[in-house]
Image (cartoon, rainbow, N blue to C red):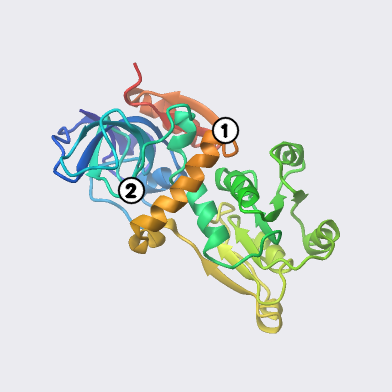
């Protein structure tokens, strides 16, 4: 079967190839074989290709860290899935290929009426959004959270997930033209970043205490978020899309006890129970099925058009999705 693989770290034109690899074979007693229907290109994939991610696989390595597909074979002990079911593929199982095999634990059958492309994107960005909103700080129902990079894939997921959890959200962007777009998504407050952000946030929220900030930008934007937080508030850093080291305020850290911590989904996966994993993805896939959780899709490609797919994905103007088994 075919797979898109990284064969040498560097520029995609040199680093990525479409290779013939061994088929996954028959499932073991607790395993399922799944034909991949849709698998997105994430920033993680591009960073792995460039050799700049938090872990790098031995080469050659099939790419793709999330996706969705149909069960084509199930082991004798598998009770939660059957042949023909659509299901999420566990995170970090390489998905830019035709078939995958894995042990079926928390996976459930998914609605066949839900958008398969949107389901394929649930694994990383919406999961990151959900966990940052639920695991970092106990924000009360109706409480406020602030995020920057609100127009990103994860930022859009934060908007939908926060609404489903009964939280209010201040969304910070870097360009004025993005404001109407996010308001159309149902964002509570949308503001353009700047050194006076805290004053404008207070005006929009009636001076509400904000205990949690989500930072994916870095640079001076991190400082702007710190200045918006209530005493003992927490800034969660989960990306650095500006490419700049984050800046902060010693005064806010010392006298307001504002703290900063990082989040990486891979760390959470190491200790998450099947019950916790299933609960989270039940919540997220229900939002997808209802249409409340969506992300823009720029284009879809078969595996053989991987070069074009990666070039489009590098523009970060909507997700690119591989469809390995599309007729």
Q: Is residue 291 left or right of residue 109?
A: right
Q: Residue at x 48, y 41 (%)?
A: 285
Question: Which quarter of the rendered picture does the C terminus lie within?
Answer: top left
The picture quadrant where one finds residue 67 is top left
Q: Residue at x 15, y 40 (%)?
A: 76
Work out which residue is located at the far bottom of the displayed protein and give it. Answer: 255
Q: Residue at x 70, y 80 (%)?
A: 256
Tell me the number on the disc at residue 92: 2
Number of numbered discs: 2
The residue at which mark 1 appears reads as 296
| Circle nearer the N terminus (2, 1) | 2
193 vs 136, nearest the viewer:
136
SS at badge 2: loop
Image: 91 above or below 18: below
Is any part of residue 218 visible from this angle? no
The picture quadrant where one finds residue 74 is top left
| Residue 252 placement (x, y as % from top left) | 70, 77
Tell me the number on the disc at residue 261: none
């Amino acid at each position: 079967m075919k797979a898109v693989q990284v064969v040498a770290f560097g520029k995609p034109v040199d680093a990525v190839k479409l290779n013939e690899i061994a088929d996954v074979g028959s499932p073991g007693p607790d395993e399922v074989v799944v034909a991949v229907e849709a698998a997105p290109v994430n920033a993680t994939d591009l960073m792995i290709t460039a050799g700049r991610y938090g872990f790098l696989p031995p080469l050659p390595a099939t790419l793709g860290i999330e996706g969705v597909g149909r069960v084509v074979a199930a082991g004798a002990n598998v009770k939660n899935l059957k042949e023909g079911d659509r299901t999420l593929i566990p995170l970090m199982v390489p998905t830019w290929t035709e078939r995958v095999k894995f042990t079926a634990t928390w996976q459930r059958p998914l609605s066949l009426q839900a958008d398969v492309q949107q389901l394929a994107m649930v694994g990383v960005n919406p999961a990151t959004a959900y966990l940052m909103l639920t695991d970092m700080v106990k924000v009360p129902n109706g409480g406020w959270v602030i995020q920057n990079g609100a127009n990103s894939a994860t930022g859009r997921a934060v908007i939908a997930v926060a609404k489903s959890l009964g939280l209010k959200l201040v969304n910070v962007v870097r360009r004025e033209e993005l404001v109407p777009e996010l308001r159309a998504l149902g964002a509570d407050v949308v503001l353009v970043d700047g050194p006076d952000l805290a004053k404008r946030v207070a005006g929009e929220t009636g001076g509400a205490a904000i205990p949690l900030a989500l930072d994916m930008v870095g640079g001076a934007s991190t400082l702007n978020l710190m200045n918006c937080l209530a005493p003992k508030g927490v800034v969660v850093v989960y990306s650095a899309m500006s490419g700049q080291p984050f800046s902060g305020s010693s005064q806010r850290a010392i006298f307001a006890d504002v703290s900063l911590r990082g989040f990486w989904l891979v760390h959470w996966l190491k200790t998450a129970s099947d019950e916790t994993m299933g609960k989270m993805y039940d919540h997220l896939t229900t939002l997808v099925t209802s249409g409340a959780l969506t992300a823009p899709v720029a284009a879809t490609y078969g595996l053989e058009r991987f070069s074009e797919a990666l070039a489009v994905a590098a523009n970060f103007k909507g997700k690119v999705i591989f469809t390995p088994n599309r007729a």
